[in-house]
Amino acid sequence: MEKQGLDTLADRIAGLILEAKRVVVFTGAGVSTESGLPDFRSPGGIWDRFNPADFTYQKFIQDPKTRKLWWQLFRERGLSTEIKPNPAHYAIAELEQLGKLDSVITQNIDNLHQKAGVPDEKVFELHGDIKWTVCLNCGQRYPFEQVKIKLDEGEEVPTCEVCGGILKPTIIFFGEPLPEGVFEIATSHACHADLLIIVGSTLVIYPAADIPVQAVNSGAKLVIINLSPTPLDHKASVLVRAKAGETMSKVIERVREKLSS
């Protein structure tokens, strides 16, 4: 995309933000990858090397080999406190500081929106988060960083220090229900929005992808910022094929300019 084209589109998005009373941002893996986290589904991503069918919740519970694969994946994916927010996260957080952000609905598990400054109560994590690991037997919770130390020391399948039970990160696995109440609350926020901004999501993973559909059907205007096509492109008031950080930085710059003029 040419620079002038992106500038013009960013200006249009800024105008929609300032016109709206309730702005909801919906984010996917295309935001996290710009912080250095590898994607699961894109070419060269995690699922090019692993079979998703081997990573269901049921197999994790039943098969020690599957648990070993999961923990191997966590080590390789590099999820840690060292991962930092990128310009897209900070631009979204600035919408909050300017009083224009109702909430963030995210498919990501990395806690980077909160690290960038969005209040925890305004972030709805559809697929859970990586902050904690829980024992499925006794319920004991451990910070993920505490478990990661064990992984870094060579432990292949960490277990509960209290009862020896199975440890599972508090993210949603294939075949596992979404966090109780989160999907419903997030959907309600989206359906009451004047403007829904999609950033870095292909909108093909359900049930999360149903939220933008419901928002549009409820009357929300739609902005899509994503490098590849999505099923809702034809519904977008503004469609941007560019990186999340570059685009959102330009958008927030235009918002500031319009507010000061």
Image (cartoon, rainbow, N blue to C red):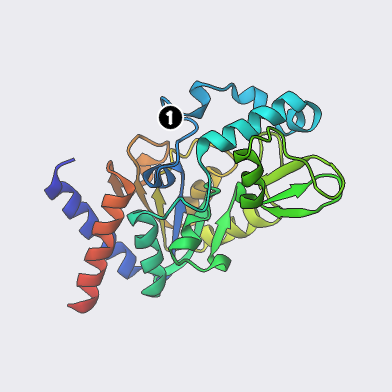
**Does 144 appear above or below 229?**
below
- Position of the N terminus, as image quadrant, is top left
- Position of the C terminus, as image quadrant, is bottom left
Question: Within the image, what quadrant is residue 66 found in?
Answer: top right
**Does 149 appear above or below 46?**
below
Residue 3 in the image: x percent, y percent? 14, 47
Camera-side residue: 146 or 31? 146
- Tell how many labels: 1
Camera-side residue: 151 or 213? 151
Task: Give neighbour class at mark 1: few <14, some 14-19, many 20+ (Cα, 10 Å).
Answer: few
Q: Is residue 59 left or right of residue 151?
A: right
Residue shown at the point (35%, 55%) measured from the top left: 88
Residue 80 in the image: x percent, y percent? 53, 48
Residue shown at the point (52%, 69%) measured from the top left: 119
Residue shown at the point (81%, 28%) measured from the top left: 62
Residue 177 in the image: x percent, y percent? 71, 43
Residue 237 visible in the displayed image: no
Q: Which residue is mark 1?
A: 42
Camera-side residue: 180 or 63? 63
Question: Within the image, what quadrant is residue 235 found in?
Answer: top left
Residue 94 in the image: x percent, y percent? 36, 68
**Amino acid type of the residue tagged 1 in the rendering:** Ser
